[in-house]
Image: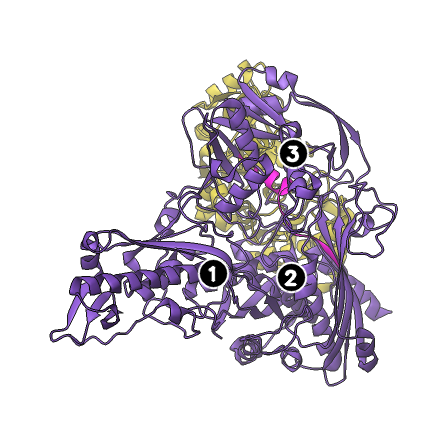
Chain colours: A purple, B yellow
Amino acid sequence: MNEEPTQYADVAELNSGKLLSGSVVGTRPVRPDGIDKVTGKARFGADIQLPGTLTGVVFRSPHAHARLLKINVSAALALPGVKAIITSDDLPLIAEELAMDKGQPPDFRDMSANILAREKVLYEGHAIAAIAAIDEMTAQQALSLIEVDYAVLPHVIDLQQAMEPDAPLLNEHNITKGIKPAPKKPSNIASRYEQVHGDVAAGFAEAEIIIVEEFTTQPVHQAYIEPHACLAQVAPSGKTDIWCSSQGQFMVQAYCARLLQMPLSDIRVIPMEIGGGFGGKTTVYLEPLAVLLSQKTGCPVRMEMTRAEVFKATGPTSGSYMSIKIGARNDGTIVAVEGVLCYQAGAFPGSPVRLGCMTAFAPYNIPNVKLIGYDVLVNRPKSAAYRAPGAPMASFAAESLIDMLAQKLKMDPIALRMLNAADNGTQTAYGVNFKNIGYRQTLEAARNHPHYSAPLGPHQGRGIASGFWFNIGGHSSAAIRINNDGSVLVSTGNPDIGGSRASMAMMAADILGLAYEQIQVEIVDTSSIAPSDLTGGSRVTFAVGMAVSQAASAVVEDLRRRAALLWQVDQDQVTWSAGFALLMNATTPKRFSLAELAQHSADTGGPITAEITINAQGAGPGFATHICDVELDPETGGVKVLRYTAIQDVGKAIHPAYVEGQMQGGAVQGIGWALNEAYLYDENGRLLNPGFLDYRIPVASDVPMIDTVLVEVPNPRHPFGVKGVGEVPIIPPLGAVANAVARAAGTRLFDLPMSPPAIHKALKRAARRRRQ
Amino acid sequence: MEYCAPGTLAEACAALGAASGTVKVMAGGTDLLPRFAAGTPRPALVIDIKKVPEAREIRQLSDGGFVIGSACSGNQISAQTALVASWPGLTEAMDLIGSVQIQGRASLGGNLCNASPAADSVPALIAARARCRIAGSNSERELPVEDVIVSPGRTCLRQDEFIVSFSLPARPQRSADAYLRMTPRTEMDIAIAGAAVNLTLDEHGVIQECHVVLGAVGPIPVYALAAARILLGTRLEDEVRQRFKRQVSVMCRPISDKRGSAEYRTDVTAVLAERAALVAYSRAMA
């Protein structure tokens, strides 16, 4: 016996701040769900069929804003094959005081009115009724038989118009929150948020250079490939099963229970594979309707949105208008920032403007910052979370201003950022002190990357931008079971949206001292594990990974106890190494493999299992710096992204390839946001481009291979050093592309998207200005 | 909705003649089927012509000209090296449409009969002086491609007619064509503007014959005769190209819509026409 213990972990050590390592974490194995996904065998939201399943469809408003005078469903209901029709009358009323938990969103009254309109429709595509019928054709025919009398109202799509005093009001009772004294008149401004740090007046008094600019961005959709889909089956007892793809089965369970006033125990949600979410599947649209229709008919009801419905009635993230002033000294030290950020909430309150204010200048140590945020109602679908909600647009404004500062001061844009970079101990404008951050390291990596010094040709430009995201922890559950043959099952309650099955298996493998292939990972239903917060906030590898690590450690403890029992020695004498229990200081060293201990489990207390629930604390903030090269076609305004490098502090990359994938995906989504994505409305507030043909997310040939650099400044609060990685990568691209375009064009664009017509117009304007 | 897929030209014509309600002739279906999904009323009958041999074959005539079946897919066309060598502009225009999957289905006939002002292959077909063979329930006729589209979404075909094939004329030496379009994305997009140029040069590199067709800048493709005349007798000298661009701009009659403003379309079309002329010229010289 000459094996030295290479791996020893217990719960106490996990929380001691000492980082674990092993032979699996940091490698790049194939994801457990990969083969099913590439062979088309994985089952997504729409892939469940039960005998007697009915088709559910939604009747939606053709108007952007209208009062519902009368909904007549009798002709539709009389159509043979139509089994049930529901309207908002079928949804329980939610009292105002019960709408939110401790004043925190979501507002379930709004959610209820969003999934089936009450009294008014607030955007084109707003759901009014839902039908269950024997097949799709019958359901579609029934849609044409629903008669609604509308009193069409003036609508407002544009953010700045919605803030005008005479704008059409979406909610006649909306009094802006966050203003004292409260305004007397209603408006479309749902709330005002103010973030003050230091003394901006004193700060600007010190400034030797001041830049003020206005910026706008358009709402953009999460553009997940899989449309929303679900199947609900309500048994005569009331027990309800929901199969759906979402970012959290427990979220779907809780939201349905709340909206339908059902006990949680009556609802089981079975998670299907998720074909993309990016934050857009952190709420419900169809599930409560399918449950209601199944309750009414006694049959399973399956619902699936079309792509047009996805565009008209789900997501997007907010469009924005921002006016920001920045002041610096001639040496480049930023002394003050002041500004107003206005974000589109859509039809109901809840834009991420507050997060925009908090994140915009967070990479920088700026002593005086005052940002005011407004959450504004417009006749568009209610905004939903999208990857680092609120941050990319604010960062676009902030990083454009910093680039302008660099240009005016004739400073290198990385040097200017380095000069002002936040460090450990820096107090952010929103109050928190940074710990264990790696922002400066991303700047150094950017400066040293060959990309940064590569030569540029004519009409080419290089842009730099940085970004910050909080990352979160939260309630997380994990269970590990050792089967009698020694195989291992890890169960979690979090949909695998970015390769988390692999990451969970890798962390468990290293703590158990096993090979990656010995670990199976299941994402289980709401009845099979303790509740876990949804997959979002870049939290799963950090927080659920922490729960998995602790569960694995608990199993190791149990295995040591069982080995000690079999050897009749004290547990302290047993160590765990490379998947074996070892007794070293006996006359003849002894060992048990995991499989042997599993076989003897009946003699040592029965099946071997551990379930952990935690509220994970200590999430590490994420920082990234991106470098983007573009080339412009000066005659057409066409823009080509030539080269792109994403650099990010990831704490510790459990599975580097999937971390790189997150960075590449975020960069590409950000490039789409910067260059082409936009909602186009006609004069009646109807969406002109509810499809991927004219809502232009980038295609593969639009982007170069996105180069990635992983900077690893470990997070000591996680057993392996993990920080969240999924959201930061979408923050810098807007600014990086804009700064590259500005330098290539010799003129700056302040409005996104920078589509070819917009760039062409800006170039013509600049040429005219030069001639004058 | 009824569906039939006749196996011969005669059967297809008979099916068209016998139909009583609305009929749609379908080749690849890449425009037609998404429209059904989007809620456009369905016809009483869809006649799929993919099994009609004359609509699916590509052959070179003894004089060097080509006949291309109207239902030949983009993939089928791109695979014909002799055709691609003679008509690089037309074949690249067809190849720009959609994705790999769409290329397996989409056809020249469908692109023409869909009658979109932004169709990619139509300006190139017109610049190539292509003619179509049109079969009816009891007659046949031939028309130049530019006579087929009468307004956006409408053709001059009668209810009982369909396009069987296109014929491309024989190529004199030193001839070449080119098609360029502007799209915000590199692929999977619809032209904001397009320009096709078809040239024949003499042995001194002087343009002897020239056809210029502009796409997406009018209700139907614009056959820019006055612009083409500017290029005749020239070698595309700088000053000629400037006059050419100005004339192209004058001939654009675009609308402003979700894909681009009239001003942008006009500016870009002139740029594309100039670049297409240069590409065609260098191909013809090669």
**Distance between mark 2 and mark 3 Cα atoms:** 30 Å
Name the spot of residue B248 as percent of width and height, x first.
74, 51
Residue hosting label 1: A543
Q: Is residue A485 above or below residue B25?
A: below
Q: Residues within 10 Å of mark 1 (few under 14, many from 20)?
A: many
The amino acid marked with disc number 2 is Ala
Residue hosting label 3: A116
Residue hosting label 2: A391
Which chain's residue wears label 1? Answer: A
Between disc 2 and disc 1, the foreground one is 1
Name the spot of residue B99 as percent of width and height, x first.
51, 46
> Which one is in front, A655 or A247?
A247
Q: Residues within 10 Å of mark 3 (few under 14, many from 20)?
A: many
**Distance between mark 2 and mark 1 Cα atoms:** 22 Å
Q: Is residue B174 above or below residue B154?
A: below
Q: Residue at 87% x, 47% y: name it.
A: A185
Closer to the chain start, of discs 2 and 1, is: 2
Task: State which region is magenta.
Answer: A304-321
Name the spot of residue A224 as percent of width and height, x first.
54, 48
